[in-house]
Amino acid sequence: MNVKINGVIVPELNRVVEQKKIAAQTGKEDKLRKLEYPLPVGIIQMIRFYYMGMRG
Amino acid sequence: MDIVSITNTVSYGDAASNHFIAMDQMLKGLGFKTALYANRIDPKLDYEVLPFAKFDPKTAKNIVFHFASGTSFVNEILKLPQDIILYYQNITPAEFFKGISWGTYRNTQKGRKQLLQLRAKTRFAWAASEYSRLELENNGFQDTSVIPIVVNLSDYKNIEANPQIYQEYKDDKTNLLFVGRIAPNKKHEDLIRLLYYYKNFISSEVRLILVGNPKASYVNKLKKLMEALQISGDVVMTGKVSFQDMCSYYKVADAFVCMSEHEGFLVPLVEAMNFRVPIFAFDSSAIPHTLGNSGVLFDEKDFGQIAHTIDYILQNKQIKSEILTAQDKRLGDFSQDRIAELLKQDIERYFIK
């Protein structure tokens, strides 16, 4: 991902931020999963089954 | 009349209506005899804007039609005997409203078709941003130029913050602010996801303030997301607020954050510059054009990367100060003197004397 500050890409800042991100996320995979799938997994599975059923 | 400006609706406090009136004041300032007409007029503005039903086309040398949404009123414009100068703000693509608001979906679709109908009637077209101007050009409009939305910055001076808002929100928490209609193209759900990341991975001392008129079906979707992510208590949704209250929220903001995927200009970016709030935005539509070489732009929605960048910059005084200096410079491009100069150049070239 590119971040432009005042119209300019600053790779050094990107690197520093990337390291901070990795450090912050270590050991917190469950919280990240919630960001990607905010609904409980059971509900997501029910929705999937419902649509698969609709398609026959 | 030298220049008659016409639009479908004028509402009090709305950015498009403010621009409609402010542009007319600038034209008057340049020495032109002008008048404003609209199909639907907010009673608070009926002293400034006349009803379109009373408009006699024979009295107008030049007609400027301000166009920002699909409406049957366009048929009245197409029936006028003379050609027009179009002012195009942009129309949100219909896809954003699919399944959320079918009425708006149909209106926005209609608007894009009407834009093509207006082409043959248009002598010259202004666009609110380079993004909108390119859209006009791609749709076959011949002579086009950019006149930014007029934001009357003097209105923002000497506005005292509402003490209640100041007391409640000017605390140790980081206030992430977005101002704008709560509509699907503005992607408030991504601001909520960003807040979730910030709260869970960086600091719990953060809140998201969303100022803007809500669209009920979309707000329900946002509330469900907030509940699922367990951050309902960290989001303040103000609804439509007074001008003073809106300014107060800018005054307590630490960062202006925008994840919108479609804007024709986005006046709140200029307001954030005016209140010296650093801007962090997703790089889409007119946003990079309004920001120019200022603010922080992200070309992807990696919420982790965005949240850590915001946190890093807010803590780094030097980078933050460089961003604010660039925003101050960009704000100068939206001064009334600068826009009046642009108007003058186009009027000399394309208007009937």
Image (cartoon, coloured by chain):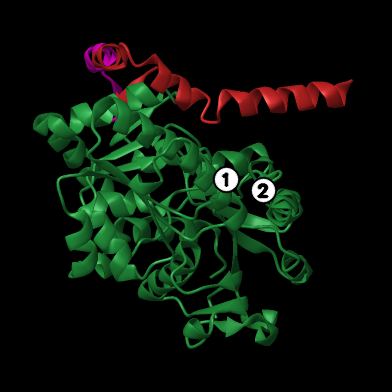
Chain colours: A red, B green
The residue lying toward the viewer, choosing from B1 and B147, is B147
Q: Kindly indicate whether the residue at mark 2 contacts the one at mark 1 (C-beta within 8 angstroms).
A: yes
Q: Position of residue B58 (x, y in %)?
A: 68, 81
Q: CA distance from mark 1 to mark 2?
A: 9 Å
Q: Which residue is mark 1?
A: B221
Please name the predominant secondary structure of the magenta segment in the image.
Answer: helix
Residue B7 in sight in this render: no
Q: Position of residue A39 (x, y in %)?
A: 55, 31
**Magenta stretch contains residue B259:** no
The residue lying toward the viewer, choosing from B2 and B164, is B164
What residue sits 76% from the left and 49% below the top? B113
Q: Compared with residue A7, is residue A20 higher up or lower down, i.e. above or below? A: above
Name the secondary structure under disc 2. loop
Q: Position of residue B219 (x, y in %)?
A: 54, 52
Q: Which residue is mark 2?
A: B100
Residue B87 relative to residue B81: left or right = left
Query: Which amino acid type corresponds to the residue marked 2 in the rendered image?
Result: Ile
Name the secondary structure under disc 1. helix
Q: Quadrant of residue B98?
A: top right
The residue lying toward the viewer, choosing from B319 and B232, is B232
What residue sits 42% from the left and 59% below the top? B343
Q: Quadrant of residue B139?
A: top right
Residue B312 relative to residue B96: left or right = left
The magenta region covers: A6-19
